[in-house]
Amino acid sequence: MLILMKPATNPDMVALVCSAVEDLGLVPHPIPGATRVAIGVTGNTGPVDETPIRGLPGVVDVIRVTKPYKLTSREMKPDDTVVTVGGIRIGEQRPVVIAGPCSVETREQTIETARRVKAGGAHLLRGGAFKPRTSPYAFQGLGEKGLEILAEARDLTGLPLVTEVIGVEFFEAVEAVTDVLQIGARNMQNYPLLRRAGKSGKPVLLKRMMSATLEEFLLAAEYLLAEGNRNVILCERGIRTFCDHSRYTLDINIVPELKSLTHLPVLVDPSHASGKREMVVPLARAAFAAGADGVIVEVHPHPDKALSDGRQSLDLDLFADLMRGLERYVPEPAVDLVA
């Protein structure tokens, strides 16, 4: 349920309501808003007697949240969540581009790519030090050495860093270096990893599993918010269908649906969705037109020599093409017309 407080509510009133919620054996989640504080409540498995709550000072109303996902729902928080990373604000209807190599292969390759995407206008740097691969014989990343290279690339360019954490055993090493923790599609339902990331002070970029429904995706994000991490970014990266002309199918439909159901920022990964570099730029533009807050793309100075996912990596010319005229693909904010 959601407890609405009066606009002039003071911290003592909020603390009193939170204490009353805890007395009921439930978990309170204060949610600051533009004009008032709301308090989300989780932990109930059945109906809750709202009477003790309704009579407390500062309480305006108590509303049932009907969705199975609570903290990620717009019922709980109507205002958009904006995640700030190194001065970059994600979720403000401005195009944000995260770019960089699929994996860290060498220092030279990573530094060159970071410098070129920075010069091209990228807002954040992506790169994999630990790589979960379908084949055990494929390149698995450089591990902690890769993290060192990524940290150097960030220091040289000033771009905040996004890199994947593939398990709780690697969590502290990645958390110490990165600015945004990425949880990949294969780990969307790795619940110990989600809970650990939920306890982190770092923002989390959560990718949708290739077979996950929208509800399953938002419930995975719910694990993060339930543990206290409010800086969560969703990422659509393609689902598995019967199509044989691309690696996956980009579910562009989910972008406006997510924007209507959740307050969290929504990104799109056209590189993994298509598996073909010639598709990436058009799909990125489609994502922005559908209302996405940003895209995350793979870029490599020499894609044909890449150790992983070279076929879907943009070369530097195609990346420049992506960055040209981004604003024109972003829809204008809706305007309420008064008769």
Image (cartoon, rainbow, N blue to C red):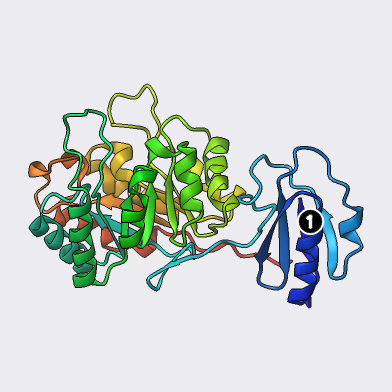
Decide: few, some or many residues near mark 1? Use Cα within 10 Å; few <14, some 14-19, many ≥20. many
Q: Position of residue 241 (x, y in %)?
A: 39, 25
Residue 196 against residue 249 in the figure, above or below: below
Residue 335 against residue 76 in the figure, above or below: below
> Which image quadrant: the C terminus?
bottom right
Q: Nearer the viewer, residue 240 or 55?
A: 55
Q: Nearer the viewer, residue 250 or 329?
A: 250
Q: Position of residue 267 (x, y in %)?
A: 42, 52
Q: Position of residue 128 (x, y in %)?
A: 25, 49
Please name the amino acid that badge 1 sits on. Val
Q: Residue at x 38, y 58 (%)?
A: 180
Q: Residue furthest top?
A: 242
Q: Residue at x 81, y 54 (%)?
A: 23
User: Would you name the residue on which mark 1 appears?
Assistant: 21
Whether residue 33 is visible = yes
Q: Position of residue 167 (x, y in %)?
A: 36, 42
Whether residue 320 is visible = no
Give the side of residue 102 with respect to residue 39, left or right: left
Q: Residue at x 92, y 62 (%)?
A: 55
* Callout count: 1
Instruction: State the SS at label 1.
Output: helix
Q: Residue at x 43, y 35 (%)?
A: 209
Give the side of residue 174 with respect to residue 330, left or right: left
